[in-house]
Amino acid sequence: MLALIVNPSSGGGRAGAAVAAVSERLREHGLEHHVAIVESLEQACEAARAAGGAGETAVALGGDGLVGALAGALRQSDGVLGVLPGGRGNDFARVLGIPLDPVAACEVLRTGSVRRLDLGVVGERTFVGIASCGFDSDANRIANATRLVRGNLVYAYGGLRALLRWKPARFDVLLDGSTVTMIGYTVAIANSAVYGGGMLIAPDAALDDGQLDVVLIGAMPRLRFLLALPKVFRGEHVKLPTVRVIRARAVEVSADRAFTMYADGEPVAELPLKVTVEPAAVRVLVPSRHVPVPLGGAAVGSDR
């Protein structure tokens, strides 16, 4: 039995609009299911815990924010999480090779296999993808607030708007006990490789290695930063002299001014804070045969 957990307002209403077609495809596959309509991440987590307790697979129809929340609700349990992309970036699905169309992704619920994956943890919040702050804090805030731009182009819009007023910040980053001080743009703490609708920010990050890839993007002129942005979609930015990647299990971040940490596109905490990895924390239905989804591919709606 599947518990299809949906916030009908996700993706500007597109996730809710997909429920009928998804239900029809699940019936065609002979998969019994029921739909849980939720209005908040808290309600979604309650529905996931109830599904896990009943021996059902909790299926997130939404974006990475919803997936990360449900993963946290099921962490260190026998519960299984399924993913039907319906958000803006759908980067967790990209990395796993799950089709970005939610109806097509129903095939994974029928034929997929269960795999234990790591989770990132910030306080009481969990994330499946990437937590970041600094320039990313401003870009995420702008992207989440806009209603003028749809799909994953909203990240480019948020980044360009943020760049207009950006001033470099000082970050002190403690990685497994060793401190790195940086003046620059962004601290990205990656459980997965991709964020922002296909940006390969941490190209060597893996969902099952028990580590976090910490990407430090140092100071550079705005024009050089802008010209370097296309490199992120190929993972080539890590070759720049102003970019460092360090692996750690625990990361503490502080800055010389206030920033909100965003994870899976959602605001999760204010700096200073600590991020850790929880290895093999959640059981996820993934394609039996991994077929990577092209980076920068089509995506819709909100991250929830």
Image (cartoon, rainbow, N blue to C red):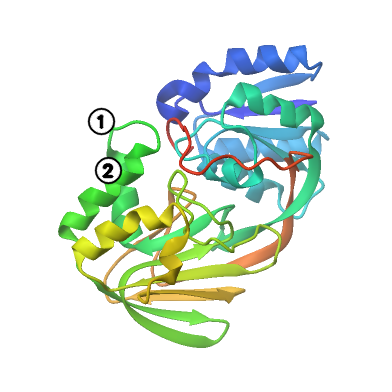
Q: Nearer the viewer, residue 160 or 225?
A: 225
Residue 26 sits in which quadrant?
Answer: top right
Residue 35 vs 280, above or below: the answer is above
The residue depicted at 65 percent of the width and 47 percent of the height is 71
Residue at image position (51%, 62%) is 202
Mark in front: 1 vs 2:
2
- As measured in the structure, the alpha-carbon distance from the residue carrying label 1 to the one carrying label 2 is 10 Å
The reply to whether the C-beta atoms of the residues labelled 1 and 2 are less than 8 Å apart is yes
The answer to whether residue 288 is above or below residue 280 is above
Element type at mark 1: loop
At which x and y percent is residue 154?
33, 39
Q: Nearer the viewer, residue 238 or 249?
A: 238
Please rate how many residues cluster around mark 1, counting C-alpha atoms within 10 Å: few if below 14, some from 14 to 19, many from 20. Answer: few
Position of residue 167 in the picture relative to residue 209 (left or right): left
> Which amino acid, mark 1?
Leu
Amino acid type, mark 2: Tyr
Q: Secondary structure at mark 2?
A: helix
In what quadrant of the picture does the N terminus appear? top right
Residue under label 2, please give it.
Answer: 157
Residue 263's place in the image compared with 300, above or below, is below
Give the mark nearest the N terminus, 1 or 2: 1
Q: Nearer the viewer, residue 50 or 250?
A: 250
Q: Is residue 287 visible?
A: yes
Image quarter of residue 226: bottom left
Q: Is residue 101 above or below residue 194?
A: above
| Residue at the extreme left | 165
Residue lying at the far bottom of the rendered structure:
178
Residue 148, numbered circle: 1
- Image coords of residue 232 (percent x, y): 41, 56
Say the numbered circle drawn on residue 55: none
Across and down, in percent, residue 91 comes to 53, 44
